[in-house]
Amino acid sequence: MTADRTTDIATEARRILLEKLIADPRLDLPESVIERAGHVRFVPENTHPFIPSLLKFSESSSALWALAGLFSDAIAQNRYGLPPQSVTLDVYSASMFLMSTYMFKAENGASIWDPFLRDRLTHLDLGNLHESYRRAATNMYKAKDGVFFHLHGSLNPTNTFTMLDLPQHRLDLQGPEHYNTVLDIFKDAVAQRDSRWLDIESNEHWRQAGTICYTPEQFRLTSHGKAMENEPIYNVNRIMEDIPPVAWPTVDARYRPLAGINVLDLSRVVAGPTISSILALLGANVLRISSHTLPDTIFLYDTQIGKRDTSLNLKTPEGKLKLKQLLEDADVIVDGYRPGALEKLGFSRTYVQEVGRRRGRGIVHLRECCYGWKGEWSFRSGWQQISDALTGTPWIQGKYFGLDEPVIPLLPNSDYQTGIIGAISVCQALLQRATVGGSYNVDVSLTQFNLWYLGLGIHDDQTHHELLRMNPGFSARHDTELHPLVAKVEMLSRRSQGEGKGKIGRLEADCAAREGGPRSSHGIGV
């Protein structure tokens, strides 16, 4: 991993957009996007990195949002006959988007951790993750052979506790004052097992997420790394080419690019729901298929904005029939479940695409996963932290702190940025469907993003020293939990950038003005 000479965020974001996205022939971008890329403005200029990391959070997010804007403009031209519009990207908005859930506020000012919001979702906490002891099943620990291993209890860590021969509950250890005691329990349990056995047992036997914490160089040498190394950031493949082009819906939409497009969202947590949330922002009608038989998280407050929700149990004949009926009018399907999960329920990609062929109107089928769609581990379940630990980004974050150990990268970064990528790829498929017809298979993954992200390089020594100066006293270790890290980064970002300068504070005010008030929970179907 080499350090590139770092400039301001706007300049680097522009370079990433033009050199790492627009110039990538594997993406097969339309001319209407390519020809306008040089006209994108990133503002404010001369703003230097402020998120305490060697990784290029702000720059990559800004470049991806700019590409999303270019596709929105291209669709508006194709659909409404509008002249080309200007695309201006605020680098602060793109940066703070990566901590979007943690900035959520209800109309009374309550944050997601306030009992006013938190307690509304207790019925979805089927894995009892309100218990701090059970949450600790998701963290990095050192194994018997000295290798760091990332456990992940998913939304229900029961199997993880069984695997480690630990009791399922320790209510006597509830609360922050017992945090170190809880960590010691897990440290001892993991230290009794070697990393290879943990990797095999968690994934192959218990079907629970977990991975060895590879360095970027180590991952590239694995068979999975070799299978994934040449994959683009997303894949859009046209199939059933005999299906004719589909006209855009006729609706009064204020020129919103995706008005009238029907999206079925079958995903949970962050990456998949963020894809459909951005599609909703662009005007699409998004219906999330949830189920009260499945656990979910506090991220709902952020990722459900702009959507409707219906609860279906797809393991019942009634639930299957209702989803089958909904498919008849769907333009886009977002499948964010474990690879093969919907296939086992009778809704494989082949089945969905046959529905499109028989009705004579193509469907865009997007699937999102952790490991990617090639390689020996593609079937595994996973989460942001797992893809991060797999590809090596935590080692780079650890290097920022001067440590020879992995530290989880500060924010739900790969989740949210994969969400942007998914929305971009759906827009590309819909634009092609309207012009040349066909149905489309779209593949995205956290690991595809992370490999592209690592390819952007890291900040140079000068920027590193400046970030350390801006964030004195900020530290983390391999077993620091993600949620406290995000809260700390948000606070540091405010302090280093200065709300009084009209930066992050102005961003929140502008959002409130556009939306008619603070971001509220009114649209959440729970």
Image: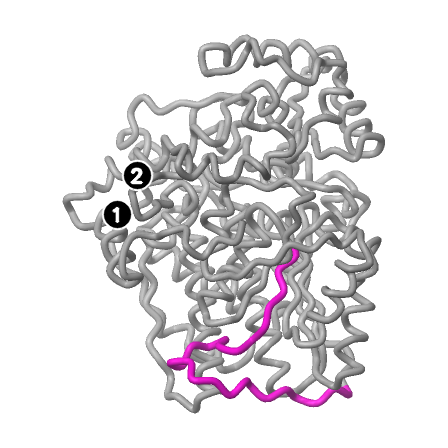
Do the residues under discs 1 and 2 have CB atoms within 8 angstroms?
A: yes
Asked whether residue 257 is drawn in magenta, I would say yes
Q: Quadrant of residue 199?
A: top right
Task: Identify the amino acid type marked 1.
Answer: Ile
Q: Is residue 7 left or right of residue 246?
A: left
Residue pictured at 51% horizontal, 61% vertical: 307
First reached walking from the N terminus: tag 1 or tag 2: 2
Quadrant placement of the N terminus? top right
Residue most toward the front?
318
Nearest the eye: 338 or 63: 338
Q: Quadrant of residue 310?
A: bottom right
The residue indicated by pointer 2 is 493
Which stretch appears magenta?
A: 242-266
Residue 427 position, x and y percent, is 55, 72
Residue pictured at 34% horizontal, 52% vertical: 519
Residue 491 position, x and y percent, is 30, 34
Q: Residues within 10 Å of mark 1 (few under 14, many from 20)?
A: many
Q: In this view, does 263 lie to the left or right of 36?
A: right
The residue indicated by pointer 1 is 504
Separation of disc 1 and disc 2 at Cα? 8 Å
Nearest the eye: 68 or 293: 293
Residue pictured at 75% horizontal, 58% vertical: 319
The kind of secondary structure element at disc 2 is: helix
Residue 302 position, x and y percent, is 45, 49
Res 340 visible: no
Task: Identify the amino acid type marked 2.
Answer: Ser
